[in-house]
Image: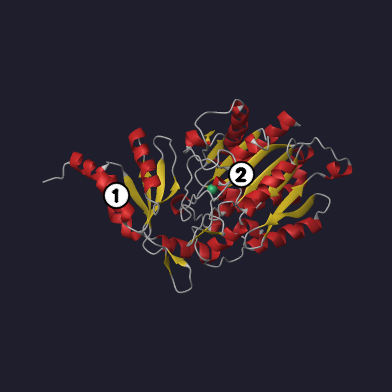
Amino acid sequence: MSFPLREASRQAGLLLAVLIVVIGGAVATESGKKSYTGYKLFSVRQNDQRQMDFLCQLQQAVEDLDFWKLDRVPGSEAHVLVPPEQVHTFRTLLAAEQIAHREIIADYSRTTDDYVFASVRSVPRKSPILTKYLRYQEMVDYLHKLALRHSNVVTVSSIGKSTEGRDIPAVTIRSPTFRARPNASQPVVFVDAGIHAREWAAPATAMYLISELVENAAQHADLLEGLSWTIVPIVNPDGYEYSHEQQRLWRKTRRQAGSSCYGIDGNRNFDFHWAEVGASNMPCADTYHGEHSFSEPETRAIRDELLQLKGRCKFYLSLHTYGQYLLYPWGWTSDLPASWKKIDEVAQAGASAIRQETGTKYTVGSSTNVLYAAAGGSDDWAFAVADVPISITMELPGGGSAGFNPPPSRIEEIVKESFVGIRAMALEVAKNYS
Ligand SMILES: [Zn+2]
């Protein structure tokens, strides 16, 4: 006798309650590094509004389900990492809701170990920027060497210190002509990356952007003659190092929050409609918004830098992974700002440049309408408070079936493709604001 679906559906609420009660605490190995043994990555098809609503409800209700990718584009696939003790209930729930899903990683710990923590052999004649995920200190060393070699174009400074005392480096890149005849009204492009620790392809892209603008300056004269660049390639160095050393999927900062948990979500910590929607008030949650806005030295560093550039900064770009989205305000409401068409034009220029170059498709739209409402994001704040007219969050490609784990062999392809989009967007900004 088959189990009636309506009955199963009625039971879904009960199952959801069961799922919430199960506590899938982090399993730490002797070295203290979190083990992901038995964690499975699922791809979940969401065909219509009902299924999208269900997944959104599931994400909000069950903290231990790690939604790597979740949007509200009908027909898209969500990616969810499920702890071993919840796999059975998770599958039963989706089956009861008639939601198609498939396992894409059977045991996440294997992927992690094979691709990421293994030492990477260096490929001769290629820059390490293209072949491995640089550690924080390697990034800083590279930036200082670059500034020494190209002192007429680059300066490196620290815009603040992280909770654990690491400098947050900022790179300023200007053409030699600008240095000879400074022009205070030259528009500034501000790019940051790595506010979310685990999104390693983002700092990798920022580092490649820096290296291209400086080491390949002759080819990019158009990007330097009309624009100045400030690039912060690693906003959250503590979290980034922690995600290399201890817990690959760490997202937040590393300040103690609450009695037993660490970290706040930097991209929910900015002071614009802070904590109103899409952020958690529980210190252990991955989207914890902090005790108050700008509670973190890392977000204050970005705030202060953008305020200093107020009036001059015309383009704020925040690099994240993953999902191939170009997102703009608002993130706190489904309404659009009055000037949304101007931002949309810039984002569309980036998306079509990438599509022409490699065929990779980006979805363009406001954060709330493409993803879900989430207040306290840096892009909303940059747009509304720091008066940056073009403010965009770029969700880079992930690692295909490996999700957050693009193997180092894919770094070159990802950063070069992303550069094409960033270049096109910057030129569009230069055209309108120079
Ligand atoms: Zn992110």
Q: Position of residue 385 (x, y in %)?
A: 65, 37
Task: Answer above or below: position of 196 versus 331.
Answer: below
Q: Residues within 10 Å of mark 1 (few under 14, many from 20)?
A: few
Residue pictured at 57% horizontal, 47% vertical: 269
Q: Residue at x 36, y 60 (%)?
A: 24
State which quadrant residue 429 falls in. top right
Can you say which quadrant of the picture contains the C terminus? top right
Report if residue 324 is visible in the image.
Answer: yes
Q: Amino acid at mark 2?
A: Ser
Contact between marks 1 and 2 (CB within 8 A): the answer is: no
Left or right: 11 as drawn, with respect to 261: left
Please state the horizontal and vertical placement of residue 103, each as a whole percent of the image: 35, 52
Element type at mark 1? helix
User: Which amino acid is tagged 1?
Assistant: Ala
User: x, y percentage for residue 283?
Assistant: 48, 54
Q: Is residue 216 visible?
A: no
Circle 1 residue:
17
Q: Nearer the viewer, residue 238 or 256?
A: 256
CA separation in Å, label 1 and label 2: 36 Å
View extreme (bottom): residue? 30
Q: Residue furthest left?
A: 1
- Position of residue 336 relative to residue 408, above or below, is above
Residue ID at (51%, 47%): 322
Q: Nearer the viewer, mark 1 or mark 2?
A: 1
What residue sits right under mark 2 in the picture? 318
Q: Is residue 33 left or right of residue 161?
A: left
Which residue does the image show at 47% across and 38% down from the upper left? 371
Helix, strand or loop at disc 2? Answer: strand
Quadrant of res 394: top right
